[in-house]
Amino acid sequence: MTGTDVVDRVRERSDIVEIVGQHVQLRKTGRSFKGLCPFHQEKTPSFVVFPDSQNFHCFGCGAGGDVFNFVMQIERVDFREALRELAQRAGVVVEEQATPLPEQVERHARLFELNARAATFYTHVLWSTPNGEPGRQLLERRGVDRATSERFQLGFAPDRWDALLTVLGKHGVAPADLIEAGLATARENGDGAYDRLRNRLIFPIRDRDGRIVGFGGRALGDAQPKYLNSPQTAIFDKGANLYALDLAHEAIRRLREVVVVEGYMDAIAAHQFGFTNVVASMGTALTEAQVRLVRRSVDRIVLALDADAAGQLATVRGLDVVRASLGEADRLDVNPVGLVRFERTLKTDIRIVRLSSGKDPDELIRSDPDAWREAVAAPLPLLDFYVDAVAGDAPPADPREKSERLGRLVPLLREIVDPVVREHYVKLVARRLDVDEGVVRRARPTANLRRPRPEEIAPRFRLPGGPEEHLFALLVSYPELLAPLVASFPEQDVLDGRNRELLDLLRRTPPDGMASALQRVPDEVGAHLAALRATMSDRPAGYPGQVRHEAEEALLRLRKERHDLRRRQLMAEMVAARAEGDVDAVRQSGELLRDLMARYPEFYPEPSPYFRDVRDAGGL
């Protein structure tokens, strides 16, 4: 792995609380952690680490950023060295790369564009042509309303071999491009191509940022396969994506819980009926890559199984993969009330919903939303479900099968930290399998549990988005023109360590040498630089004054976004501290809010409702 991919992987596997905690004595208050700032002298803690957003900020000196920024500042190293150190901690291999690959960035951007155009075509067919009538009838039978269909951008592929090829071909899209995007399939004889999805209801699959990375297609009637997904491409891996995550992300963060169902229609039904923290694994067993997409936004992952045995066994296989991906230090801790918590790698409580009514999530939600709500509110702890699923309803008569089942349960039993809880489950397993407790304690794990192969955990490719990336895309595209802005740039508002590295480089370089200096950035930053520039590739030409104005506006939006983020974080901490009765934490949060107001006076015109918020929360 190199470039953007390895940075994303290291960031996913690095816990900023753990990293900062090796240098700063932190005290938990609410959801955050506070301590004395390591970058300036202070007696009252104003240095705060926010686990939810994985960043830190000192409300005294203004230092802040992501985990890379912290290591860069505390160790006084550049981004490359910080990446190497964090990668070593996280067990990620960083390969050397001679030069950045801007052509790869452009290729990915092209695939996103082709997917977006295909989705527009499929949606047009569904709602505006006679060819879409079978799809409209299917949605009506399944009870999917028009508003929900449009929110998920559902479409329909005509019952033709070349519908998409023909339409996009008229706009200059070559069949080879559609094959690369997974939208078309090459004929076996090498003579041309045909549409991959035909006579199917279409489900665009989007990443968390809303970009379409692939498609799922549901066949009509008894045609097989019932569901056909895009093949793996440069931007799509079914096992590394969660359907509807872009629509569910805000609710997941707000509720601190995600519900994972199996299929597209399950997720769509949930959102239509107001259960907006639901995503779908698209028919695959749960993978480590999918867990990592949401683990920092949640305290609990709830798996809602299909009622059939096959769906339950698929989930067990997924749990095997997740468990096998943990190292020796990543132990399962079951507390006295039965929570299974991944202490280091996942740090997430995983629970299982069993739908005893015999209905799949889609059916249950539509027929009895209250029953669904009650089932999700009372899921089984992971270990209880695992024992039930593996041990079965009755002890097997075949001793070899009994041994195999015990071997699958032993690894989890050994990883329970609490001895009382471990003893409880030892007795439970012995009783369920009809073996002596001593046999359970001496048993060895089944040998077929393995770590997932690297290709099973595909990294996510992300192009820039948001005011920080927009601003830096302008800076690296027009460095000489925006040199005055570089000199006055507020460094504390830069959260991405790679952008901090670029800013430092531009500040050290005279304006007439900035363009050439950017050609010599380290490989680890080079891919990020290419991605930033790629966002400017389709930009229409503008006058220098327009570019400067756009950059100044982007800087203002960035400063406002950073201010609003820090204010929301502090207000949330104050509310949590008041709920816990922590008077000192309430007072400290109020003081930090006053410091924030003093640092950003332009965002507090008098009379300001922000001051009233702080006063009412008890901070003033």
Image: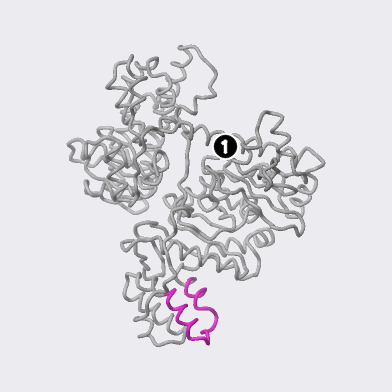
**Left or right position of 474 against 147:** left
* Three-letter code, disc 1: Phe
Residue at 34%, 48% (x, y): give it: 93
Image quadrant in which the C terminus is located:
top left
In this picture the colour scheme is one colour
What segment is highlighted magenta in the picture?
386-409
Residue furthest to the right in view is 130
Occupied quadrant, residue 532: top left
User: Toward the viewer: 578 or 561?
Assistant: 561
| Residue furthest out toward the front | 189
Main secondary structure type of the part rendered in magenta: helix
Confirm whether the magenta stretch covers residue 539: no
Tally the marks. Answer: 1
Spot occupied by residue 275 in the image (x, y as percentages of width and height): 59, 53
Quarter of the image with the N terminus is: top left
Say whether residue 36 is left or right of residue 321.
left
Q: Counting other residues with Cα less than 10 Å from the Cα at mark 1, is it few (<14), some (14-19), or many (20 or more)? A: some
Q: Is residue 474 above or below residue 60?
A: above
Q: Residue at x 62, y 56 (%)?
A: 263
Q: Is residue 487 left or right of residue 176?
A: left
Viewer-closest of 109 and 441: 109
Can residue 495 be spotted in the picture?
no
The residue to which callout 1 is attached is 112
Q: Position of residue 454 (x, y in %)?
A: 43, 54
One can see residue 519 in this view: yes
The percent position of residue 562, horizontal first and vertical second, equals: 39, 33
Q: Is residue 390 magenta?
A: yes
Instruction: Give SS at disc 1.
Output: helix
